[in-house]
Image (tube, helix red, strand yellow):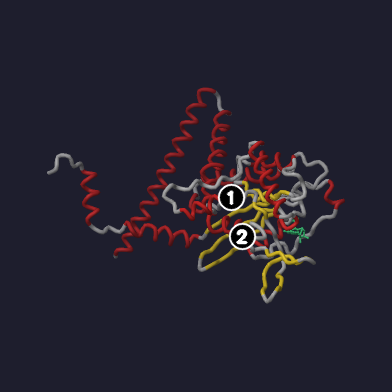
Amino acid sequence: NNPGCNYLSCTIKSSLNKYVGFATLPNQVHRKTVKKGFTFTLMVAGETGLGKSTLINSLFLTDLYRDRKVPNAEERIGQTVDIIKHTIGIEEKGIKLRLSIIDTPGFGDAVNNTASWKHVEDYIDQQFEQYFRDESGLNRKNIQDNRVHCLLYFISPFGHGLRPIDVECMKALHEKVNIIPLLAKADSLTQAEVYSKKLKMRDEIKQFGINIYQFPECDSDEDEDFKRQEQILKDSIPFAVIGSNIQVDSKGRKFRGRSYPWGVVEVENPIHSDFLMLRNMLVRTHMQDLKDVTREIHYENYRAQCIQNMTRMMPGPLNRSATDFLLLSFQLRKMQEVLERIQEQMQQSQTGTC
Ligand code: GDP
């Protein structure tokens, strides 16, 4: 009877008085994603010998490179960059993660490295292309996401900042993948050297217009401790890392470390390196954001480019209508997905209340 009350606002009000069951939505999403499992694809690049395989083993407590054969100098002269994929299933407290590591042996090893990163770039594009095809096909429910979510780029600790190949490579890839630069073998540098090299590299990254992965901005209502941690993370780029494949036994403690005549370096000790910060960031705090940025920015750029290229190949008048058609079919598909999701949620909440 209220003249100011239209149908929609009345419905919302009445539903607020009763318990309908929306509060279970997070649980439903949680159950569904846990059942499906998680996937994450990590790529590593950088000159041979910078400790890439050792770091990956240390990060995920695996031994991924057991059968690896390192080529000799002669074999490496004319070597091209290979792309090797290792996939492992990790389970922790019932949560399954399918982790894929994309290795790029041969990167920067040839006499002429002008196009060292071309293979890496092609690989990233191929994964986008495959996803684009699958997404446009009929069996969209079972798409395997092989898109590269993060690239750990190893920088030598022995140079004076970035080398030309680092600049060229990161610039060639920064629009396609989330780049996280790492200062490799940090135990070979003093604390002051780590500090000054980090400063120089951050300056160069800015100066050369390289867009590395940006940590998301904190919301203003976030607590102070969280904001401080995020700032430390941003100021630590490039992460200074140390890796080791062996367990050291020292003073009654066992840990992954490197033993030298003058002392022992602990991989997971935050005073010795940023290893722990990197692992926490990759696994505990930013894995989902890395995936979101891949999907929403890098993949969307690729998709937009694809659609543009496809329509450009058509003759003039067809060009405009083809663009409209592609956009319309994409919107229809998105709507269909939303409807399917709503239907599923309704079914689940009905079974939940029965
Ligand atoms: P990759 O070719 O980049 O995969 O490098 P590897 O992981 O095979 O490491 C090459 C060599 O460097 C091996 O002898 C490792 O033991 C050593 N190494 C790996 N990580 C570190 C590190 O953090 N510090 C030091 N000093 N040496 C390392």
Pinpoint residue 98: horizontal percent, then vertical percent. 58, 60
Disc ID at residue 149: 1
- Give the residue drawn at x 43%, y 60%: 30
Label 2 CB less than 8 angstroms from ligand 1 = no
- With 129 as the anchor, is 296 left or right in this view? left
In this orientation, which residue lies closer to the viewer: 233 or 121?
A: 233
The residue drawn where x is 44% and y is 51% is: 222
Give the mark nearest the N terminus, 1 or 2. Answer: 1
Query: What x and y, as percent, mark residue 28?
Result: 39, 59
**Image location of residue 253, percent across then percent down:** 66, 74
Please give the count of numbered marks on the rendered protein: 2
The quadrant in which the C terminus is found is bottom left
Q: How far is disc 1 from disc 2 in space, using C-alphas?
A: 20 Å
Ligand 1 - quadrant of the structure image: bottom right
Which residue is tagged 2?
Answer: 276
Position of 325 with respect to 127 (left or right) is: left
Counting from the top left corner in percent of width and height, residue 271 is at 64, 60
Q: Which image quadrant for residue 69?
A: bottom right
Q: Is residue 113 above or below residue 186?
A: above
